Image (cartoon, rainbow, N blue to C red):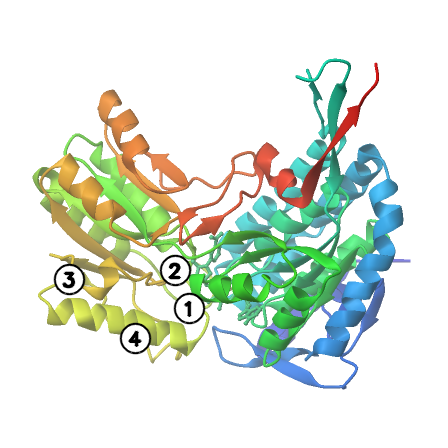
Amino acid sequence: SHIQPSNHLRILRATYAMQHNVPSLNDKSLLKDQTYINGQWVGAKSGKTFEVHDPASGKLIGTMPEMDKEDTEAAIKAAADALPSFRQLTGRQRSKMLRKWYDLMIENADDIAKLITWENGKPIADAKGEVAYAANFFEWFSEEAPRVYGATIPATVAGNRVYTTKEAIGVCGLITPWNFPAAMITRKVGAALAAGCTVVAKSPGETPFTAAALAELAHRAGIPPGVVNIVTAMKNTAEVGSTITASNTVKKVSFTGSTGVGKLLMKQSSDTLKKLSFELGGNAPFIVFDDADLDVAVTGAIASKFRSSGQTCVCANRLYIQKGIYDDFAKAFTEKVKNFKVGSGYAEGVTHGPLIHDRAVNKVEAHVQDAIKQGGKVLVGGEKMPNLGSNYFQPTVIRDMTEKMVLAHDETFGPVAGLFPFDTEAEVVRQANDAEVGLAGYFFSKDVQRCFRVAEALEVGMVGINTGLISDPAAPFGGVKWSGFGREGSKYGIDEYMTIKMVTLGGM
Ligand code: NAD
C-alpha cells in the first residue's frame, strides 16, 4: 500500500533533489531518458545521446537519444502503419482519447510544470500557467473532433448532386520550439489527432523532457501505438528535419520557430508538395495612444513584454508611446520593472527566470548596446547578470528609441523594452507596419472609432486592444507576411490537418 511520507522525509527529499539539481516529481516515471516511438520507449539506433542543461544553473539535467535519419524513418513508418485504423475511428472515439489525455495533464500538472521550469527556466507559476494553457488545446480539440462537418452544395449542372466531406490528411510532421515546451506541442497534436492524423513530432533539443512526459501520458490515455511518435535530436536536428520534409509518406508539416528555418523547411518540402502551416517569428508593435488608460496600458505592457522574460513570439518588441503620455508611461512602467525579481524559476518570489542560453543573452546585449550607441537612454537594467549565471540579463527599459536601431527591425526575444515616441496615428501605423513579419500587434485607446480603425490597419494576424494577453485555445493563432500562414487553435485549427473531398453524383 502507498504510505504518505512524513513532512520530515519530504523535506529531506526536497533538499536532496535541490542539491542534485533534480526536481522532486510526484511521479518519477514522468522523467525519461528515452523517447516514444510506436508505443515503445526507445533510444537512438546508433546508441548516441545528447545532453540537456538547466538554463538557470547550467548544470546537466540528463540525456536524450540523438536520433538520425534511420530513427526518423522508423517513426514515420510507425505513424503510417497506425494511420488506417486511427483515421477510421469516429470523431467521438478520438474525442474520448484526447479528453483522457487532457485529464491526465491536469492531474499531473505540478510535475509537468516542474519539468518545464527545469529545462526552460521560466518561473514555476508561469510553467503552471503553460500547463493549463497546453492542456486546454486537448480539451478544445476533443470537443472539435466530433464536429467536423462537410457541406451539401446546390450544383449548377442539372441532375447532379454535390457534397463534401473532410478527411484526415495523413501522417504529419510537427516541429516545435523550446519557449513553450508543452503548449507548442499540444496545439499541433491536439488538432492533428482530432482530425484523425498520426504524427511524428520532433521535440526541441533544449526541452525534450516535457515532450517525453506528454508522450507517457498519451500512452496512459490509451492513444494507440504509432499515433504519437516523438523524435529527439540536437546536433542532428537538420537531418531529422530533412528526413521529414523529404518523406512522401508525410503529407503535412506544421512548424513553429524562426522565419529562417521556416523558409528552409518550405524549400525542402517543395519536392513532395506538402501542405504546410508555419508559425514564425514576430516583432510585435505595442502602441499606447494619449487617450489610453495609463494603468491598463502599463499592466498590458508588463504582461506582453516580459512574459517568459520576453521569449514569446507574441511578445511586444517595439513599444510606441504617444508624446502626450510618454513620460508618465515611461515612469510608471519603469517602476514596475524595478520590482521584478530575477533568478532561478524555482526560487521563492522570483518573477523572471533566465534566458534559454548564452546566445540569446548575447543577442539581447547586442540590441541594447546598439540602442545606447544611437542615443537610447537606459531607465533600468541594460546589463548581463554574471553573479546569477551566464544566461541572465537584467529586465531593461530604454527610452528615446528611433527607427534606425536594430531593435526596431529585429525580434529581440529577451527582456528589453524599447520606448519609441510618436506624434500621430498615421505615423505610428506606418512604423508598426514597417516590418517583414506580422504576428501580433497591440494598442491601447479609449476611442472606439480609433479601435476599429487601427485594428483594421495593422498588418498582423492577431490584434490585442487594451490587453497584452491574447492567447486562447478558442481563438485562431497565426500570422501574416513573414510570420507565416495557417492558424492554430479555434475551429480553424483542425482544418490545417484535413483535406476537403468533393463528391458529385450524376444522372439524377
Ligand atoms: P528555431 O527556428 O531555431 O527552432 C525551432 C525548432 O526548429 C526547434 O525544435 C529546432 O530544433 C528546429 N529546427 C532548427 N533547425 C531546423 C532544421 N534545419 N530542420 C528542422 N528543424 C529545425 O527557433 P528557436 O530559436 O528555437 O525559437 C524562437 C523562434 O521561434 C522565434 O523567432 C519565435 O518568434 C518563434 N516562435 C514563433 C511562434 C509562433 O507561434 N509564431 C511561437 C514560438 C516561437
Q: Which mark is residue 397?
A: none
At horizontal 91% and vertical 58% (from top left) the residue drawn is 1
Mark 4–mark 3 Cα distance, whole angstroms, equals 24 Å
Give the CA separation, mark 2 to mark 1: 7 Å
- Return the disc, 2 or 1, that comes first in the chain's sequence: 2
In the rendered image, the vertical position of residue 255 relative to residue 236, given as above or below: above
- The alpha-carbon separation of the residues under discs 3 and 2 comes to 24 Å
Q: Position of residue 108 (x, y in %)?
A: 70, 52
Q: Amino acid at mark 3?
A: Lys
Query: Residue at 44% across / 75% down in the picture?
Result: 357
Disc with the residue nearer the chain's start (3 vs 2): 2
- Of helix, strand and loop, which one carries label 1? loop
40 or 128, which is in the foreground? Answer: 40
Badge 2 vs badge 1, beta-carbon distance below 8 Å: yes
State the SS at label 2. Answer: helix
Q: Which residue is mark 4?
A: 384
Classify mark 3: helix, strand or loop: loop
Q: Is residue 3 visible?
A: no
Compared with residue 374, is residue 80 higher up or lower down, i.e. above or below? Answer: above
Q: Where's residue 67, x and y in %?
A: 70, 77
Residue type for callout 1: Leu
Name the amino acid, label 2: Ser
In front of the other: 170 or 354: 170
The residue wearing badge 2 is: 309
Q: Is residue 9 visible?
A: yes
Tell me which numbered mark, 1 or 4, is placed earlier along the sequence.
1
Residue at screen point 85% across, 62% down: 39
Ligand 1 closer than 8 Å to label 4 CB: no
Counting the numbered discs, the total is 4
